[in-house]
């Protein structure tokens, strides 16, 4: 199911919209060196990946955020580390200002990821400090959350790299206990594919330079 070809073909990458910003330069570099390979990005909206698609070769590479997965017959590599903080858009700050203390949180609006299982590393802090009545919008879709925050509708948890890229204002600085890891997952048989092997190599080179 995992083709060896490095000619005209498609490489299917599965991941959340959260990691798109990190993978854009990787995809750009890969396309330059492999112009005959079309990259197809499949958006996932949860913290799981479709292992059956990876096993059948319908998905070639998956990016998963959270704790290290442990899947039989799959290879997991830590390729990116996210520093998470609380951020707001400049338009929100112009209207509402910035919380100066934890008590001020009751005067602000928040746009949050819906996390019923409380898997996010900042879940406990969020539940202890952000009143439910100030959570104006909740969604499991990161792209939806980001659009609302960019539009000035509230404060949210964001990876620092994404906040900087978007020109966001820092509300609460990243905390070590909020950090999250991004894992690249491939099937063991995928090592036979030139395209997949080269893409993984490109990701590892980019992540090494980014960490440095």
Image: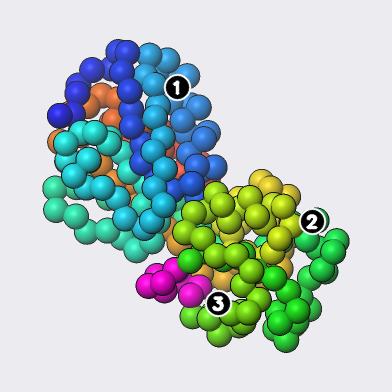
Name the image quarter holding the N terminus.
top left
Which disc, if any, is residue 90? 2
Q: Is residue 69 above or below residue 55?
A: below
User: Dots 3 and 1: beta carbons under 8 Å?
Assistant: no
* Residue depicted at x 18% and y 44%: 52
Which segment did they paint magenta? Answer: 115-123
User: Dots 2 and 3: beta carbons under 8 Å?
Assistant: no
Compared across the picture, whether 98 is left or right of 203 comes to: right
Distance (Cα) linking label 3 and label 1: 40 Å
* Image location of residue 92, percent across then percent down: 78, 61
The answer to which image quadrant residue 180 occupies is bottom left
Tag in front: 1 or 2? 2
Magenta stretch: helix, strand or loop mostly:
loop
* Image location of residue 155, percent across then percent down: 67, 65
Q: Secondary structure at mark 3?
A: helix
Tag in front: 3 or 1? 3
Dot placed on the residue nearer the N-terminal end, 3 or 1: 1
């Amino acid at each position: 199911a995992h083709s060896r070809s490095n000619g005209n073909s498609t490489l299917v990458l599965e991941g959340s919209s959260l990691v798109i910003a990190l993978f854009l330069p990787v995809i750009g570099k890969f396309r330059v060196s492999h112009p005959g390979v079309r990259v197809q990005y499949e958006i996932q909206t949860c913290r799981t990946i479709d292992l059956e698609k990876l096993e059948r070769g319908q998905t070639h590479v998956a990016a998963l955020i959270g704790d290290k997965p442990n899947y039989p017959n799959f290879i997991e590599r830590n390729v990116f580390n996210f520093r998470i903080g609380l951020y707001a858009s400049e338009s929100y700050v112009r209207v509402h200002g910035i919380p100066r203390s934890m008590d001020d949180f009751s005067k602000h609006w928040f746009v949050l990821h819906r996390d019923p299982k409380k898997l996010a590393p900042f879940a406990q802090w969020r539940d202890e400090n952000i009143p439910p009545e100030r959570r104006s919008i909740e969604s499991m879709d990161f792209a939806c959350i980001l659009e609302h925050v960019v539009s000035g509708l509230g404060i949210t948890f964001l990876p620092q790299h994404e906040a900087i890229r978007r020109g966001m204002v820092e509300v609460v600085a990243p905390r070590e206990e909020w950090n999250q890891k991004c894992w690249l997952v491939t099937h063991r048989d995928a090592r036979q594919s030139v395209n997949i092997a080269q893409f993984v190599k490109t990701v590892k080179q980019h992540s090494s330079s980014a960490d440095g």
